[in-house]
Amino acid sequence: MRVIREAWLEFTIRKENNENFISQKATFRTKGIMGRLSWIMSFPFHFFIFRGMVKGIINYGKNK
């Protein structure tokens, strides 16, 4: 199977003035026109997926 894209996520948690902040960086590298089309078609869903993922991480941390 030919790979048309690569994707990975990077999370950073930092503390400033006694508050915790989480940031998320999504990297997406396409390969060829099919990879780019795949990225364009899946892009609208990423907002909801990533937002839910960060909320889940925050809730998990609060319950620990």
Image (cartoon, helix red, strand yellow):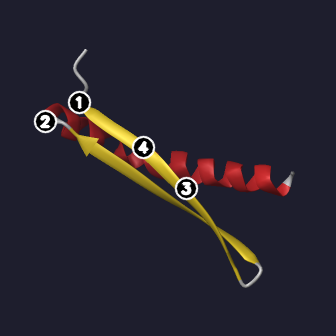
Mark 2 sits on what residue? 32
Q: Looking at the figure, which quarter contains the N terminus?
A: top left
Mark 3 sits on what residue? 11
Q: Residue at x 42, y 43 (%)?
A: 8
Tell me the distance, in whole angstroms, between the alpha carbons under discs 2 and 4: 18 Å
- Marks 3 and 4 in Cβ contact (< 8 Å): no
Tell me the distance, in whole angstroms, between the alpha carbons under discs 1 and 4: 14 Å
Q: Which of the two discs, 2 and 3, sits closer to the camera?
A: 3
Badge 2 marks a residue whose secondary structure is: helix
Mark 2 vs mark 4: which is more N-terminal?
Answer: 4
Among all residues in the image, which is located at the extreme top? 1
Q: Amino acid at mark 3?
A: Phe
Is 51 drawn above or below residue 17 in the view shown? above
Q: Residue at x 37, y 41 (%)?
A: 7
- Judged left or right of residue 27, residue 18 is right
Q: Residue at x 27, y 44 (%)?
A: 29
Q: Amino acid at mark 1?
A: Ile
Mark 1 sits on what residue? 4
Q: Amino acid at mark 4?
A: Trp
- Marks 1 and 4 in Cβ contact (< 8 Å): no
